[in-house]
Amino acid sequence: MNPKGVHFIVEASGCSSVIGEVDRMQEILVESARRANAQIWAVSFHRFPPNGVSGVVVISESHLSVHTWPEVGYVALDIYTCGSESLPEKAVDYVLEMVEAKHTHVTEITRGLEDNGDHEFYHSLITWEEVLKEDK
C-alpha cells in the first residue's frame, strides 16, 4: 500500500452546543468516517468535565479525532487518511456542517511523499481560513 495520504488539521470556531454532547459527537465522527469512504476499526469517546468531548475513530486508512471546548464554541478536528479511495475532505465538510461552525482555519498536509523511490518521505503544507456562516 502507498503511504501517501492527506491530513487535515481544522480549527472550528463559533460552533453550536452539539459539541458538548458526547453521544452526538461520536455519531458525527463515525458518519464522517463513512462519508470519507473509510473502514472503521475502533471508536472511543469521552466526556471531560464540565462538558468537553474528546474522541477518536480508528480507521484502516489512519484516524479521525476531535477535542471540543463548548464553553468557547471551539472544536479541534484532525482527519488523516491514506489510500486512493479515501475522501477526507468529505469528512471535514460533514463535521463542520454538523457542528455549525462559523469560522475555520484549515491546514492540509500531504504526507508520505517520495521523489525517487529511496524510502525517504516528506510532506507538503497548505493552510487557509474560511468564514462558513455569517452572524445575524
Image: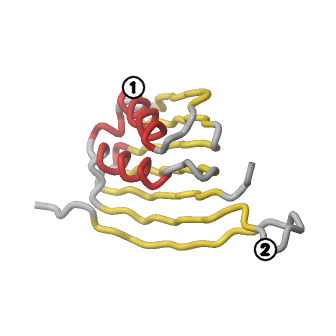
Q: Amino acid type of disc 2?
A: Asp
Label 1: which residue? 23
* Relative vertical location of residue 53 with respect to residue 36 in this rendering, above or below: above
Q: Residue at x 60, y 42 (%)?
A: 63
Q: Position of residue 24 (x, y in %)?
A: 35, 30
Q: Residue at x 46, y 36 (%)?
A: 34
Q: Is residue 33 left or right of residue 124?
A: left
Q: Position of residue 51 (x, y in %)?
A: 39, 33
Q: Is residue 37 left or right of residue 80?
A: left
- CB contact under 8 Å: marks 1 and 2: no
| Helix, strand or loop under label 2 | loop
Label 2: which residue? 115
Q: Is residue 123 left or right of residue 130?
A: right
Task: State how far apart marks 1 and 2 are (Cα).
Answer: 43 Å
* Relative vertical location of residue 50 with respect to residue 7 in this rendering, above or below: above
Is disc 1 surrounded by few (<14), some (14 to 19) or many (20+) residues within 10 Å?
some
Nearer to us in this view, 49 or 45: 45
Q: Amino acid type of disc 1?
A: Asp
Q: Quarter-wise, where is residue 99 in the image? A: top left
Q: Nearer the viewer, mark 1 or mark 2?
A: 2
Q: Position of residue 10 (x, y in %)?
A: 47, 58
Mark drawn on residue 41: none
Nearer to us in this view, 106 or 18: 106
Q: Residue at x 63, y 50 (%)?
A: 83
